[in-house]
Every structure is written in C-alpha cells, then in structure tokens.
Amino acid sequence: MTQTAEPDSAAVPDDGDFTRPVRVEPREGFTLWVEFADGTNGRADLSFLADGPAFEGWRDRPFFESVRIEGDGVIWGNDLRRSGYSLYIDVTGLPWQEVWSRLGRESALV
C-alpha cells in the first residue's frame, strides 16, 4: 500500500512543517518508507515500538499495512498514531533538538 497526500502538498507547507509526511509505504517487518514535505525520504524502523502493548495490533500484518497519512503524521486504525516529527527523527537520525529548532519551536520540551 502506498499513500500519497494531495498533489499540492509536495511543497513545504506554509506553517513550515517540513516533517509532515506526504507519502508512506509499509515495508518488511515493522518498517515504513516515508517521504516528507521537504523531500527528505527514507526508512523508519519502528521495531523498537512493536513489543509495546499499544502496538500489538501491528502483529496482524494487514493492520500494519493499513498505515495512512492523517494530518501531520501517520495512523493505523482510528487511533494508533506516529507523528511526522517522530518519523522524521526515525528516518534522519537527527537529534530531536535540531529538528525542533528547525521547526522554530522553543528549545526545551517538558
């Protein structure tokens, strides 16, 4: 399954959220291939989440493959989400502080 956002969403949105996914494809295991609004793309290995109780639905392969873009992240079913911000870090390996700063947000998270 490949999910692509609306055609006009390929550019970085007016709000500057370059971490917004514009395309997502499930891959082997618990990985996704994701493309973001700024053109960055790559593989997000989410296997570190798979053993958590919130993610047990992923053990059903069709459910994992049902991933779709919604808002500024991706979603499975009606409520299992991963933010574009988190996926961007998963794909790039950049420190959260750098990504947060590029988004123009305060440097500290509580």
Image (tube, grey):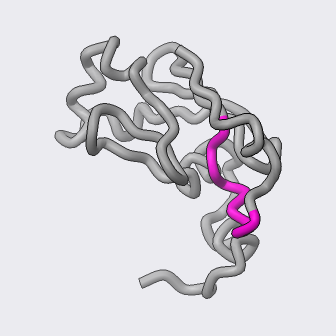
Residue 55 appears in which quarter of the rendering?
Answer: top left
Inspect the magenta stretch and tell me whether residue 16 lies in it.
yes
Residue 72: percent from left, percent from top: 54, 53
Q: Residue at x 66, y 54 (%)?
A: 19
Residue 98: percent from left, percent from top: 71, 70
In the rendered structure, the answer to whether residue 77 lies left or right of residue 26 reads left
Inspect the magenta stretch and tell me whether residue 99 lies in it.
no
**Above or below: residue 30 compared with residue 95:** above
Q: Which residues are magenta?
A: 14-22
Residue 75 appears in which quarter of the rendering?
Answer: top left
Residue that extends furthest to the left in the rendered view of this protein? 53
Of residues 90 and 77, the one drawn nearer to the viewer in this rendering: 77
Please state, as top left, top right, bottom left or bottom right, where the C terminus lies in the image.
Answer: bottom left
Q: Residue at x 75, y 71 (%)?
A: 102
Residue 61 appears in which quarter of the rendering?
Answer: top left
Q: Residue at x 45, y 17 (%)?
A: 29
**Above or below: residue 24 compared with residue 38:** above
Residue 45: percent from left, percent from top: 53, 33
In the rendered structure, the answer to whether residue 22 lies left or right of residue 56 reads right
Number of numbered discs on residues:
0
Of residues 104 and 59, the one drawn nearer to the viewer in this rendering: 104
> What secondary structure is the magenta-colored segment mainly?
loop
Q: Residue at x 30, y 42 (%)?
A: 80
